Amino acid sequence: MLSESSAAIVTATLPVVRAHGEAITGCFYQRMFAAHPELLDLFNRSNQATGQQKAALAAAVVAYAEHLTGAGAAPCGPILDRIAHKHASLGITATSYPIVGRHLMAAIGEVLGDAVTAEVAAAWDEVYWLLACELIAREARLYTAAGVGEGASIWRDWRVTEVTPEATDVRSFTLVPADGGPVPGFVPGQYVSVAVDLDGGLGQQIRQYSLSGAPGADHWRITVKRVRGAGGAPDGLVSTVLHERVAVGDTLRLSPPFGEVSAVAGDGPLVLVSAGIGLTPAMSALEHLAATAPERPVVLVHADRDAAAHAHRDALPGLYAKLPHLRLKLWYEETTEDDGAATPTAEVARGRVDPELIPLSPDTHVHLCGPLPFMNQIRGGLLRRGVPVERIAYEVFGPGMLRGV
C-alpha cells in the first residue's frame, strides 16, 4: 500500500506524469540501453523502433499509480499478470529491477525537470518499488511452476523435426527436446519464447509464438508468419531467420510455456475468434477439445485475407469430424468460388467479421486473438450484446492491451 504522504503527492502529480508518460519512458530506454547495451538482447527492437514499447510501459506505470491512488476504474491485475508472464518468458529476474528503477527515476527527473522535488521523486520511487515487488513475486511463482530453479536459465534446446508450409508466408515448426527429455505440458493459449542469434554480431532477439498443436503430444508445434516490412518498416528480424534459415535437424532455444490466458476456459459453449496468424491458439484449443471434450459446442470465427493466407485451413475438415458440435464461420477479404473446397462445413462470407453475426449462448465463453483493432472491435460488439467481460479472454501479439482492460 502506498504511504499516505506519497499517495497525496502521486495524486497531485499524476496528470503531469500521464501527459509526459511516453517522453519519460522513451528517455528511460535511451538511458538504460546506453548504460547496459547487453539488455538490448531482451527487448524487441521492432517495438522499440515503432514506439510501441515505450507507450506500453508508460500505460502500465500510470495504470498502476492510478490503482494505488484509487484514480483508476479498470482492474490492474490483468496488466500485472500479462507483464509477469512476458517477463518470465524472457528470463527476467529480480536483479534487473534496480537497474530499471534507477534509470526510470532519472528519466522522470530529466523530462519533468525542477518539478521533480525530492518529495516527488521519493513518492514515485515508492510507486515503482511497489510495482516491482508485485512483479518479482508473480514471476517467482511462474518460475517455480515451470520448474526453473532460482538463478537457472529458462532456455532449452529443441530440435526441429518438421517444417510445414501452412499458407502464404506461414510455416509450422515441429520440435522435440534436443536432450531427449520430457515434453512439458501447456494450456491452449500459452506461448513460448524463441531466441535467435542475429548475423554480424548484432546480438540476440526473442519473440513469443503461441503453441499451435495439441497439449500432451510428444512434440511442440509453433506456427510463424513471416513479417514483411511495409511502408518503410523493416522485415521481421526473427520471423525472417526462422523462414529462411531454419531446417529439419536444426536446434532452437525455447523457453517454457507461459501466458495467463486459457483458450478453453469454462465448460459450456466456446467461441474462438481470430484473425490472420491469431488463429494459432484456436488451433491448439480445437486439437485439445477433440481429444478431451469432443461434445463441447464450439464456434470458430476466423478472418483472413483469402483462402491462400488462411493457415491450417486444410486441418479444419478433420477437426470438424472429431468435434460434432463445431461450427465454422469464416470471413475473407477476398473470396473465390473454391473457398469452400477444403472446408465444406464452413460458412464463408466476404468482408470484415460482424460481431452481430457471431453465434452466442447465454453461457458462452469467448477467446480472441488477432490485431488490436480487430479485437477491440469484436470485444466491443460482444459487450454490447451482453457477454460479461469476465467471459472474454484475449491474447495480444505485442506490448499492447485492449481498451478498458
Image (cartoon, rainbow, N blue to C red):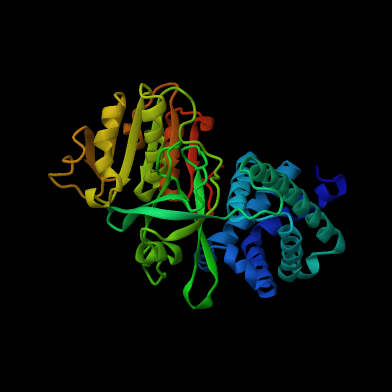
On the question of residue 83 being in view, the answer is: yes
On the question of residue 353 being in view, the answer is: no
- The residue lying at 65 percent from left, 59 percent from top is 19
- The residue lying at 55 percent from left, 48 percent from top is 256
User: Would you place residue 154 above or below residue 215 in this image?
Assistant: below
**Residue 364 placed where, x, y %?**
43, 25
Q: Indicate left or right for 3 with 106 as reference.
A: right
Q: Indicate left or right for 82 with 186 as reference.
A: right
**Residue 218 placed where, x, y %?**
43, 41
Q: Which quadrant: the N terminus? A: top right
| Outermost residue to the front | 180
**Residue 135 placed where, x, y %?**
69, 48
Q: Indicate left or right for 23 with 339 as reference.
A: right
- The residue lying at 73 percent from left, 49 percent from top is 131
**In the image shown, does 294 or 18 lie closer to the viewer?**
294
**In the image shown, does 95 or 389 lie closer to the viewer?**
95
| Outermost residue to the bottom | 200
Q: How many labels does the image show?
A: 0
**In the image shown, does 111 or 148 lie closer to the viewer?**
148
**Residue 124 placed where, x, y %?**
78, 56
**In the image shown, does 158 or 260 lie closer to the viewer?**
158
Q: Which quadrant: the C terminus? A: top right
User: Would you place residue 287 above or below residue 119 in this image?
Assistant: above
Residue 171: quadrant of the picture? bottom left
